[in-house]
């Protein structure tokens, strides 16, 4: 199948993109992705084959030199004689050890040796290219490459600076496909069926993309770049991720605030209307009361009278307090006078006599009561002895006079206190009389208030005044709340809303562009599937033709090949009256798996020769095509297939490694292959 031209494919894709309704500005991006990333791989080499290989210390091989001049070669011999090692040496010489790939070459240096050397003479479009690759094992593997693209003879490897693998890959024409980061060993696995990894190509997770590129379908890189652009260039910021929700939230807040404002304005109108009505009624009530308000005067009088009554009662309370103090003083003076009257004999005696401070007999000190007892009884109250009268001193006239003066002073104080009592009582009576007068006047004023015609109007006026004040306060609070909500709306509409709208618009554009790119990628994938369908059809036809070779073994009843509907290159071999054989079944170590891989690889290589610009490697290596264990059922089919392989792949250099067993007869291959004995 001939692949369509690049410009033709671009035009078809852009037309379908337009039919999908992708906006024009996004179509320009799609076109740019196509033009920049869709291009055929241009190989500078048409044909790469191997002419000769020298091997030193590679695995079991100490030294060997193999001539591949005849393009169909079989390495034949006993096991463990170096056939597989020689085939691995071919791959190593061309590709290197490549430790960072899934397919690894481990422990290649012969036991007891520290260095291996492979020197390959490769034919690049008929010209000799020498590649010498040396691997030394010291503290680690150290690989050295030397390349001569114009040798004078097979020994002319040169001694210049070591070369790189990229230089080798460019020289032999493998770099265009290798630059796609697919891995050299993975790429080579299509051309090399080796034990342990003969089915690597079938299982390779990127085989669809790789096969596409081999057959000139190079649109996968367009999808890859478009996906990268979507995920990186159009990645939403954290603000953009929540822009829709945030914008809806702000718009909801504004709407709620506007609803609140409408409700507040309606309430404000009601309050203001009610306030105006009450103010008007208050003015009318005041007009009815007039400038001179008799009731106000009466109420003012009432207030003043109550104030005067309170003042008089406070004064009366002060006088009552003074009266209690004076009465206590009078009672004390009266008690003192009464005491002197009861003890008159002793008082009379005391006018003339005085008693010493000590008893004349026992000389002990005596207090006033004891002196009085001594004076009355004539006996010492302490020692109880009779005191002679001559021992009691007679009081002087001066002492008697002092006692009289003291009593007169006390009587004067008593009289003064009694006069003060009468004066205070008079003041209290006067105050009580004035209080009675004021209370009578208060009762009269209150009676007038009760009888006043303006009382009801005044009560209404006071009620209206209170209502007006409450309504004015409510109107003020409503206005404050309205202002606050309007300011919030203004802040949201002037700042937050435009910011979110801008972020949302950015998000919208990115999402729209992402959706356009997803549609674009789908269109490109559909184009890939259309082009791939032709390849799949050709491969299926080729594989079905190859199935005719198998007459006795596992594939003897196989009649057709169906590729899976997902658009990839997985397939199923249909078998009459038996189990179908899917390519993805884990059968690497079975003859079924080997036959499936051999069938598919051969068909792919066969179809590649029908496409002009493809990978230049024209080498197909098959190691141990017969099973390690006896498999006489499939042996005739495998032998028959290998005999016809030169005709199936006439442009390919075939190198087979076959063990000398009962299943293999080298003589049957002698007409098609050059036999190299091991």
Image: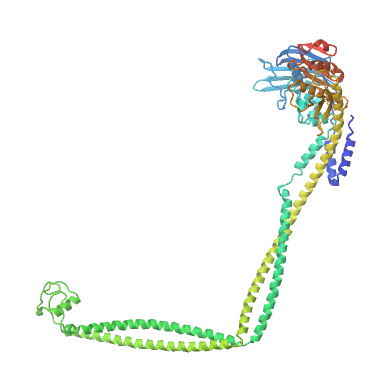
Residue 353 as seen in the image, left or right of residue 531: left
Quadrant of the rendered image containing residue 160: top right
430 over 578 or under it: above or below: below
21 over 327 or under it: above or below: above
User: Closest to the observer: 619 or 576?
Assistant: 576
Where residue 107 appears, as percent x and y from the top left, is 68, 20
Residue depicted at x 77% and y 51%: 505
Where residue 560 appears, as percent x and y from the top left, is 84, 26
Quadrant of the rendered image containing residue 136: top right
Camera sees residue 509: yes
Quadrant of the rendered image containing residue 676: top right
Camera sees residue 157: no
Total label count? Answer: 0
Looking at this rendering, what residue extends furthest in the front direction? 577
Name the image quarter holding the C terminus: top right
485 over 17 or under it: above or below: below
Name the image quarter holding the N terminus: top right
Where residue 350 appears, as percent x and y from the top left, is 17, 82
Where residue 240 appears, as percent x and y from the top left, is 73, 49
Q: How is the image coloured?
A: rainbow
Residue 475 as seen in the image, left or right of residue 430: right
554 over 259 or under it: above or below: above
């Amino acid at each position: 199948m001939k692949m369509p031209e690049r410009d033709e494919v671009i035009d078809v894709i852009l037309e379908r993109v337009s039919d999908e309704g992708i906006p024009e500005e996004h179509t320009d991006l799609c076109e740019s992705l196509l033009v920049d990333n869709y291009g055929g791989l241009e190989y500078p080499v048409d044909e790469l084959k191997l002419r000769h290989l020298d091997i030193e210390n590679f695995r079991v091989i100490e030294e060997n030199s193999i001539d591949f001049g005849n393009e169909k070669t079989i390495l034949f011999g006993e096991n463990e004689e170096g056939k597989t090692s020689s085939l691995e040496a071919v791959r190593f010489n061309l590709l290197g050890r490549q430790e960072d790939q899934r397919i690894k070459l481990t422990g290649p240096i012969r036991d007891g040796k520290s260095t291996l050397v492979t020197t390959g003479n490769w034919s690049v479009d008929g010209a000799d290219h020498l590649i010498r690759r040396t691997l030394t094992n010291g503290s680690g593997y150290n690989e050295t490459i030397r390349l001569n693209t114009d040798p004078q003879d097979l020994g002319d490897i040169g001694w210049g600076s070591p070369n790189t693998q990229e230089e080798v890959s460019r020289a032999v024409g493998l770099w265009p496909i290798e630059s796609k980061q697919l891995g050299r060993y993975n790429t080579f696995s299509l051309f090399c069926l080796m034990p342990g990894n003969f089915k690597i190509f079938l299982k390779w997770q990127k085989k669809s993309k790789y096969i596409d590129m081999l057959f000139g379908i190079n649109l996968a890189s367009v999808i890859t770049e478009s996906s990268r652009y979507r995920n990186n260039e159009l990645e939403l910021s954290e603000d953009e991720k929540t822009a829709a929700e945030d914008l809806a939230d702000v718009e909801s807040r504004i709407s709620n605030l506007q609803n609140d404002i409408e409700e507040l304005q309606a309430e404000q109108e009601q309050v203001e209307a009610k306030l105006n009505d009450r103010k008007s009624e208050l003015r009318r009530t005041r007009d009815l009361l007039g400038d001179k308000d008799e009731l106000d005067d009466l109420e003012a009088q009432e207030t003043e009278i109550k104030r005067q009554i309170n003042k008089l009662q406070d004064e009366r309370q002060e006088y009552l307090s003074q009266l209690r103090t004076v009465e206590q003083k009078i009672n004390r003076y009266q008690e003192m006078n009464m005491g002197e009257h009861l003890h008159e004999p002793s008082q009379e005696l005391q006018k003339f006599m005085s008693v010493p401070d000590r008893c004349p007999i026992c000389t002990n000190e005596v207090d006033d009561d004891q002196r009085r007892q001594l004076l009355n009884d004539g006996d010492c109250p302490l020692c109880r002895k009779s005191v002679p009268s001559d021992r009691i001193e007679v009081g002087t006239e001066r002492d008697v006079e002092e006692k009289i003066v003291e009593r007169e002073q006390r009587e004067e104080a008593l009289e003064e206190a009694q006069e003060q009592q009468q004066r205070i009582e008079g003041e209290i009576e006067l105050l009580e009389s004035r209080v009675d007068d004021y209370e009578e006047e208060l009762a009269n004023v209150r009676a007038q208030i009760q009888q006043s015609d303006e009382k009801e109007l005044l009560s209404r006026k006071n009620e209206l005044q209170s209502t007006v004040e409450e309504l004015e306060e409510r109107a003020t609070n409503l206005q404050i709340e309205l202002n606050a909500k309007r300011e919030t709306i203004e802040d949201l509409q002037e700042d937050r809303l435009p910011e979110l709208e801008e972020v949302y618009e950015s998000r919208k554009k990115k999402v729209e562009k992402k959706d356009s790119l997803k549609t674009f990628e789908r269109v490109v994938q559909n184009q890939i599937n259309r082009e791939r369908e032709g390849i799949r059809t050709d491969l299926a036809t080729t594989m079905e033709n190859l199935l005719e070779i198998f007459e006795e073994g596992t594939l003897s009843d196989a009649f057709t090949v169906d590729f899976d509907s997902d658009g990839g290159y997985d397939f199923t071999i249909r078998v009459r009256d038996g189990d179908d054989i899917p390519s993805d079944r884990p059968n690497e170590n079975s003859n079924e798996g080997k036959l499936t891989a051999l069938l598919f690889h051969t068909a792919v290589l066969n179809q590649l020769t029908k496409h002009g610009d493809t990978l230049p490697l024209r080498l197909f290596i098959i190691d141990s095509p017969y099973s390690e264990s006896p498999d006489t059922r499939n042996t005739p089919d495998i032998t028959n297939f290998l005999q016809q392989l030169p005709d199936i792949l006439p442009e390919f250099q075939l190198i087979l490694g076959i063990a000398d067993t009962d299943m293999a007869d080298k003589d049957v291959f002698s007409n098609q292959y050059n036999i190299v004995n091991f």
